[in-house]
């Protein structure tokens, strides 16, 4: 179905977007059927050849869900953390005091967030913000189910769930 080198657009009948879409869908199908090794092999190829971080994001989501399905919530979480880092947003480990400080700084953003602010926007929202939001949803799911974070429930909630949501709202309202 694909040419010998499906990523080389200098060759005839090669399309980067078609290759990316086809391989991402194949990885998803393998994951869905429980063929994790095959899905992982395809995902590694996607990660090697993707031109932009947003092109890798669907692969990271599949990878995270694959790890979660296998009961490895910590690696699922770390996969989404890497996806965010590739998109330019890192979630750093913090102290309790740092979490409290960040929470107090970000809480007003949540209270002020008003639907009218978003409806009154004149410009389109940057696609990367939508991608970051989707990754954060997956990351929150992985953090929720992770035994890795269960021992630090409050800190994990602040660091891995509340903070990303507040950062996303902040990015959205200040874009």
Image: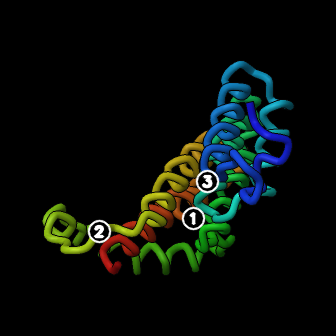
Q: Judge from the rendering whether residue 122 lies leftward or rightward of residue 39; answer left or right.
A: left
Q: CA distance from mark 3 to mark 2?
A: 21 Å
The residue nearer to you, when weighing 61 against 164, is 61
* Callout in the foreground (3, 1): 3
Give the x, y percent position of residue 8.
78, 56
Residue at point 60% right, 68% down?
87
Query: Are the residues tagged 3 and 2 within 8 Å (C-beta)?
Result: no
The residue carrying pointer 2 sits among few (fewer than 14), some (14 to 19) or many (20 or more) residues within 10 Å by Cα, namely few
Please count the marks in the image. Answer: 3
Q: Which residue is mark 3?
A: 57
Q: Which residue is mark 1?
A: 159
Give the x, y percent position of residue 146.
67, 43
Q: CA distance from mark 2 to mark 1?
A: 29 Å
The first of marks 3 and 1 along the sequence is: 3
Secondary structure of the residue carrying numbered label 2: loop
The residue nearer to you, when weighing 12 against 51, is 12
The first of marks 2 and 1 along the sequence is: 2
Could one spot residue 79 in this view of the protein?
yes
Q: In what quadrant of the picture does the N terminus appear? A: top right
Q: CA distance from mark 3 to mark 1?
A: 21 Å
Query: Are the residues tagged 3 and 1 within 8 Å (C-beta)?
Result: no
Q: Which residue is mark 2?
A: 124
Q: Judge from the rendering whether residue 123 lies leftward or rightward of residue 38; answer left or right.
A: left
The residue nearer to you, when weighing 14 against 159, is 14
Residue at point 64% right, 63% down?
53
Give the x, y percent position of residue 45.
81, 48
The residue carrying pointer 3 sits among few (fewer than 14), some (14 to 19) or many (20 or more) residues within 10 Å by Cα, namely many
Q: How is the image coloured?
A: rainbow
């Amino acid at each position: 179905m694909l040419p010998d080198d499906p990523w080389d657009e200098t060759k005839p009948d090669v399309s980067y977007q078609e290759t990316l879409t086809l391989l991402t869908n194949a990885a998803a199908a393998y994951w869905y059927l429980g063929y994790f090794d095959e899905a992982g092999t395809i995902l590694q190829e996607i990660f090697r050849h993707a031109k932009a971080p947003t092109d890798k994001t669907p692969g990271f989501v599949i990878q995270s869900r694959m790890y979660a399905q296998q009961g490895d919530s910590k690696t699922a979480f770390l996969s989404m953390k890497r996806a965010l880092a590739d998109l330019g947003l890192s979630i750093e480990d913090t102290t309790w005091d740092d979490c409290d400080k960040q929470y107090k700084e970000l809480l007003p953003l949540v209270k002020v967030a008003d639907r009218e602010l978003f409806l009154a926007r004149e410009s389109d929202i940057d696609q990367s913000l939508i991608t970051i939001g989707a990754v954060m949803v997956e990351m929150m799911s992985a953090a929720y189910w992770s035994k890795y974070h269960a021992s630090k429930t409050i800190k994990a909630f602040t660091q891995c769930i509340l903070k990303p949501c507040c950062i996303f709202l902040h990015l959205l309202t200040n874009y």
